[in-house]
Image: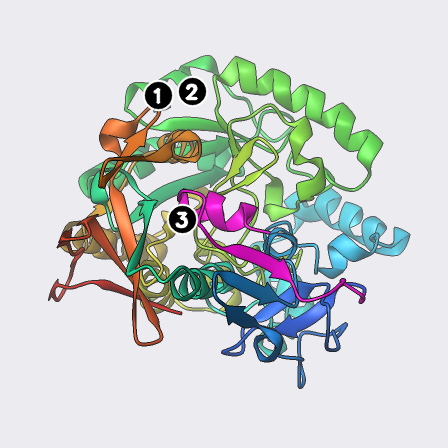
């Protein structure tokens, strides 16, 4: 029951016990654990609901702590994995109907022939009820972070310690992380990648380009080499971008073999599925270091759901870098919004959790005059917060490599001090979690000489909701 907690914080094994208050008697369903955050899993007491709305059972009422023992009415490892793997979603719990598969196949077959205006109209019709969705929480859902911080608060109280050490989320004490990604959907977008690299470079960002390897457009070796020569990254974007990759498992396995061949040919470390169609249970068949197909909140995507976290995590041995902000296409064409207001709101929510800001824009849509102006304003804002808030802005492959390294590091007690052991330890920083009232507060450095994290309005600790 402590595996997800220990993996999240990369902390030493705590002298406390997390135990179930009784056998898990219910089938999986929705419940709360304080503050209105929705969980999905089984419980030892209380009623779980098939819906995420209504008067949900609050498991906090049946959470107890005595001495060094914490009693929980649910298994946090199960609940966190259910959220990260989207096991609560209708897509995960039921197979897509033959009718829905047929409609999707027809749509993607005729999509190249449809004008943008008609496509937008059809997509808006399908997504018209998105504002009524209560879960995951729009515009950013941090339920996994809230669960982990609640567990940390319980651990601090149960252990009687003033603080608990852990390995900080980002190298060299960065407060958060930014990655910029570009999905290339058409030959038109492919031919604009040079212009988009110019824009990114002008604000000091390097990005990854996800390239469709078959059917959509030619992929000359010179094109891939130029992206790499300029310090950007090449990844694989689906197989043929027809919306059918995850329709049926046998066909997925056939396509996965071809995708893996293209990964080797491209020298690609990462993958993103077309239109963010996904099935986390199948991703292990893909031979990549990391995936970027799972949104934090998927209200404006054809496949609803969301992983409810703003930090990377593992799906089997693959690092998942969740998409934590709105796509340019959805912002411009579904919402009709050409400002950066929503992006900025999401960025601030992510940074409150020291998370990963993932930006996805398409060369196909972002370089016309109005969209380009908005994108440049976004990059300008990101450049400012990068400097003011001490954020890391690497390529996605570097984030995945760091997250893999961090997961293998260990905190070891040497005398009265903690030290980090493992590959990459020279970039790792020890952090401490402590309680101030009901809030968990993170600080960097030794307990007696804690260095607070630098934020935009001066030097202060990072406060988390506990």
The residue range painted magenta reads: 1-26
Residue 158 location, quadrant: bottom left
Between 242 and 358, the one lying in front of the other is: 358
Q: Residues within 10 Å of mark 3 (few under 14, many from 20)?
A: many
CB within 8 Å, label 1 to label 2: yes
Label ID, residue 224: 2
Question: Residue shown at 37%/35% (left/top)?
Answer: 399
Q: SS of the residue at dot 2?
A: helix
Q: Which residue is mark 3?
A: 358
Q: Relative to 453, does residue 130 appear above or below in the rendering?
A: below
Assess whether residue 85 is covered by the magenta stretch: no
Q: Which residue is mark 1?
A: 228
Q: Disc 2 or 3, which lies upstream in sequence?
A: 2
Q: Nearer the viewer, mark 2 or mark 3?
A: 3
Q: Nearer the viewer, mark 1 or mark 3?
A: 3
Assess whether residue 25 is covered by the magenta stretch: yes
> Residue 140, can we see it?
no
Distance between the Cα atoms at labels 2 and 3? 22 Å
Image location (x, y in percent) of residue 30: 69, 70
Distance between the Cα atoms at labels 1 and 2? 6 Å
């Amino acid at each position: 029951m402590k595996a997800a907690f220990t993996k999240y914080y990369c902390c030493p094994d705590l002298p406390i016990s997390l135990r179930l208050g009784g056998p898990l008697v219910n089938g999986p369903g929705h419940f709360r654990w304080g503050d209105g955050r929705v969980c999905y899993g089984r419980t030892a007491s209380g009623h779980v609901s098939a819906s995420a709305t209504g008067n949900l059972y609050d498991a906090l009422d049946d959470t107890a702590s005595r001495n060094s023992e914490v009693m929980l009415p649910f298994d946090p490892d199960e609940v966190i994995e259910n959220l990260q793997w989207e096991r609560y979603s209708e897509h995960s719990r039921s197979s897509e109907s033959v009718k829905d598969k047929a409609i999707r196949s027809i749509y993607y077959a005729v999509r190249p022939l449809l004008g943008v205006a008609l496509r937008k109209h059809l997509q808006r019709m399908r997504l018209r009820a998105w504002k009524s969705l209560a879960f995951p929480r729009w515009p950013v859902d941090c339920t996994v972070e809230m669960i982990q911080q609640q567990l940390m608060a319980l651990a601090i109280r149960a252990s009687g310690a003033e603080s608990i050490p852990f390995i900080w989320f980002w190298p060299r004490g960065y407060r958060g992380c930014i990655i910029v990604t570009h999905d290339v959907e058409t030959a038109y977008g492919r031919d604009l990648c040079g212009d988009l690299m110019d824009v990114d470079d002008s604000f000091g960002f390097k990005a990854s380009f996800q390239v469709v390897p078959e059917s959509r457009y030619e992929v000359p070796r010179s094109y891939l080499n130029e992206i790499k020569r300029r310090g950007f990254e090449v990844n694989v974007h689906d197989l043929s971008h027809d919306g059918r990759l995850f329709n049926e498992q046998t066909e997925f396995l056939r396509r996965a073999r071809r995708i893996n061949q293209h990964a080797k040919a491209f020298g690609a470390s990462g993958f993103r599925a077309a239109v963010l169609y996904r099935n986390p249970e199948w991703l292990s068949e893909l031979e990549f270091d990391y995936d970027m197909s799972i949104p934090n909140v998927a209200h404006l995507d054809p496949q609803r759901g969301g992983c409810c976290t703003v930090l990377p995590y593992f799906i089997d041995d693959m690092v998942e870098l969740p998409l934590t902000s709105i796509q340019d296409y959805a912002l411009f064409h579904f919402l009709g919004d050409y400002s950066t207001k929503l992006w900025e709101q999401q960025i601030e929510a992510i940074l409150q959790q020291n998370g990963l800001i993932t930006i996805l824009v398409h060369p196909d849509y972002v370089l016309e005059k109005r969209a380009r102006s908005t994108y440049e304003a976004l990059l300008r804002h990101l450049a400012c917060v990068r400097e003011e808030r001490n954020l890391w802005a690497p390529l996605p492959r570097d984030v995945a490599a760091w997250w893999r390294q961090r997961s293998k590091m260990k905190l070891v007690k040497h005398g009265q001090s903690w030290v980090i052991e493992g590959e990459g330890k020279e970039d790792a920083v020890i952090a401490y979690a402590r309680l101030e009232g009901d809030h968990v507060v993170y600080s960097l450095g030794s307990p007696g000489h804690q260095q607070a994290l630098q934020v935009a309005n001066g030097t202060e600790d990072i406060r988390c909701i506990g």
